[in-house]
């Protein structure tokens, strides 16, 4: 599946959470929609090799799961 | 002063503001911060309430309870002491469906011959185990009817030697007629059908060659088996991308057809699924979210009096609460490949597990039963290496889940192209780990959820359940 550049999905750097979304699974359009629809949730979207790196503004695990739920439903629409 | 007891070496991990501790014998407990500090600094004195609790839970040993702890360990890992019990016969690689995620698609499909079937029976008969499960897999097994009948009748005869025999058919249920259904009833063949959920989900992926969905045919045959032949059918869903949002609909569909168990398992990145991965696949984290939502919903249904269990949760709970081995080959360490299960292909070649035969090729192939003995096959170097790389303590030696969790070296290899896995990046391991942690969170929080989870594995007198 992802033979190269394997990274943990969720990373914490300082006070920020980052999720890595592989280009094989997530289209660019999805990233655009996330940025538009969740400006309070997502601080930035960056491109890193095979991945998109999404910086989240979440504090608790419940918010992280809320983001994942949002990601699942959005990913099905696109 | 020397102590007359010992704390068994343990691992620990944070679970819901508490600490889960476990040791290799399967002893475990969840402690608050103060108790955990006392225990981990080995300042736990005999006679204190904490000592008594940990002694009872198998975390502290002395001469009096040591035999009990060893017995628990043997029960939890009883797969280590028996010969292979699960024998998977792939009697054909032909299939009348063209499922979009098919993991067993064969470029040149073939039927198993009676010659290979006879040799398969011989291999199974020679196994030194009191329980044998013969599982028909495919392709669609019912398309090679003569061999299915031969194997079923021959294996049933082994029951005369005081062995318990289970025969299970994994089928798409679209190539059945009344004669075949009657045979399954007469020979007590368990039937397990693929049902991905309600029609609009099932028909997205499980289709005939002409692109038409199979849901209506499957349901018609389930009804017929139940009504005319009084034969129960178990179901198995494959969770694809389109299922992730539909956890309620899938579970409701299972409840609708009277299922008391559902196994929520991810689609594997094998076979046809590879080329359709963008439409079918998801990240492990998405599946974990699905699993969390689905398990919560199942618990809600149980609270309303609707009894349905999640099968993977049940496997975990059997290990954790009952300290018994559910013989679930993916959660053994080393894994059950070649030890707990073996796969016979139509041409007589053997693979150590279902995933390995789906990958195919020479790397995992053990040899051919037509020209080698079973003993030679299971002593092959590639199997020994495979088992070595499936020992959890090699890759996650400090894991608090190590008494119970397993590693699938085949899936890790296909994903990472390396037998030395980056375990915390492994798709399947992340999912296994999450399942355990989420269930332990429920255990730590207690309340009604815990009572329901316990009831899923509570032993009732005379109960002899097989799913």
Image: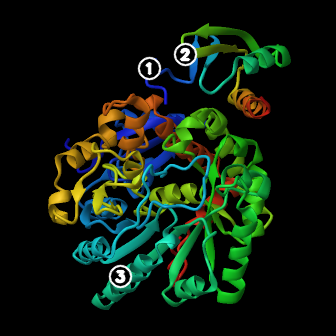
Q: Quadrant of residue B386?
A: top left
Judging by the rendered image, the residue that carries numbered circle 1 is A4
Q: In this orientation, which residue lies closer to the viewer: B369 or B398?
A: B369
Chain letter of the residue beneath label 1 in the structure image: A
Query: Cβ–Cβ below 8 Å for labels 1 and 2?
Result: yes
Host chain of mark 3? B
User: Measuring 59% from the left and 83% from the top, which residue is drawn there?
Assistant: B181
Which residue is tagged 2?
A50
Residue B43: percent from left, percent from top: 36, 37
Q: Is residue A10 above or below residue B179?
A: above
Q: Is residue B369 left or right of residue B166?
A: left
Badge 1 and badge 2 both on one subunit? yes
CA gap, disc 2 to disc 3?
Answer: 51 Å
Does residue B32 appear anywhere in the picture? no
State the image coordinates of residue B405 (x, y, percent, origin top left): 42, 47
Q: Position of residue A18 (x, y in %)?
A: 62, 16
Are tags 2 and 3 found on a single chain?
Answer: no
Which residue is found at the position 71% from the left and 57% from the top? B448
Which residue does the image show at 22% across and 42% down from the upper left?
Answer: B385
User: Which residue, given by chain and number where applicable, does mark 3 sit on?
Assistant: B155
Q: Along the polypeptide, which appears first: circle 1 or circle 2?
A: 1
Q: Give left or right: position of B44 versus B251.
A: left
Neighbour tally class for label 3: few under 14, some 14-19, many 20 plus, Cα within 10 Å:
many
x and y, in percent, of residue B34 in the image: 51, 35
C-alpha gap between disc 3 and disc 1 = 46 Å
């Amino acid at each position: 599946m992802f033979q190269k550049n394997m990274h943990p999905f969720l990373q914490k750097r300082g006070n920020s959470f980052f999720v890595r979304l592989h280009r094989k699974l997530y289209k660019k359009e999805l990233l655009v929609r996330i940025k538009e629809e969740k400006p309070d949730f997502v601080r930035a979207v960056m491109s890193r090799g095979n991945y998109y790196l999404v910086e989240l503004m979440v504090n608790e695990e419940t918010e992280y799961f809320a983001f994942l739920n949002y990601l699942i439903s959005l990913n099905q629409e696109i | 002063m020397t102590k007359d007891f010992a704390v068994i070496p343990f691992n620990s991990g944070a679970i819901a503001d508490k600490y889960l501790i476990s040791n290799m014998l399967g002893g475990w407990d969840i402690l608050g911060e103060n108790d955990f500090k006392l225990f981990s600094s080995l300042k736990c004195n005999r006679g204190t309430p904490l000592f008594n609790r940990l002694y009872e839970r198998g975390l502290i040993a002395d001469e009096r309870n040591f035999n009990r702890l060893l017995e628990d360990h043997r029960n939890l890992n009883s797969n280590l002491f028996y010969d292979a019990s699960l024998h998977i016969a792939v009697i054909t690689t032909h299939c009348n469906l063209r499922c979009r995620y098919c993991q067993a698609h064969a470029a040149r499909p073939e039927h198993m011959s009676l010659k290979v079937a006879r040799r398969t029976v011989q291999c199974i008969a020679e196994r030194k185990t009191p329980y044998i499960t013969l599982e028909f897999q495919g392709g669609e097994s019912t398309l090679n009817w003569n061999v299915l009948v031969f194997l079923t009748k021959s294996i049933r005869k082994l029951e005369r030697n005081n062995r318990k025999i289970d025969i299970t058919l994994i089928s798409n249920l679209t190539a059945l007629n009344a004669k075949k259904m009657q045979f399954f009833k007469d020979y007590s063949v368990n039937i397990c059908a693929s049902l991905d959920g309600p029609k609009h989900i099932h028909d997205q992926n499980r289709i005939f060659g002409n692109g038409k969905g199979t849901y209506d045919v499957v349901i018609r045959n389930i009804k017929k088996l139940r009504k005319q032949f009084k034969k129960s059918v178990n179901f198995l869903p494959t969770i694809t991308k389109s299922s992730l949002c539909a956890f309620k609909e899938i579970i409701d569909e299972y409840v609708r057809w009277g299922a008391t168990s559902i196994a929520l398992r991810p689609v594997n990145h094998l076979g046809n699924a590879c080329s359709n991965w963008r439409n079918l696949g998801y990240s492990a984290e998405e599946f974990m979210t699905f699993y969390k939502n689905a398990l919560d919903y199942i618990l809600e249904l149980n609270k309303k009096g609707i009894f349905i269990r999640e099968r993977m949760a049940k496997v975990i709970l059997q290990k954790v609460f009952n300290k018994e081995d559910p013989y679930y080959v993916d959660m053994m360490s080393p894994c059950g490949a070649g030890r707990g299960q073996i796969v016979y292909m139509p041409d007589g070649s053997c693979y150590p597990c279902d995933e390995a035969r789906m990958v195919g090729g020479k790397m995992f192939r053990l040899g051919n039963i037509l020209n080698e003995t079973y003993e030679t096959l299971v002593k092959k170097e590639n199997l020994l290496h495979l088992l070595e790389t499936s020992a959890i303590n090699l890759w996650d030696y400090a894991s608090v889940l190590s008494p119970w969790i397993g590693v699938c070296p085949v899936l890790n290899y296909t994903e990472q192209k390396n037998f030395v896995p980056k375990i915390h990046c492994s798709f399947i391991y992340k999912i296994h780990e999450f399942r355990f942690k989420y269930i332990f969170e429920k255990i730590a929080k207690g309340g009604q959820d815990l009572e329901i989870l316990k009831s899923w594995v509570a032993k009732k007198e005379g109960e002899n359940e097989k799913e």
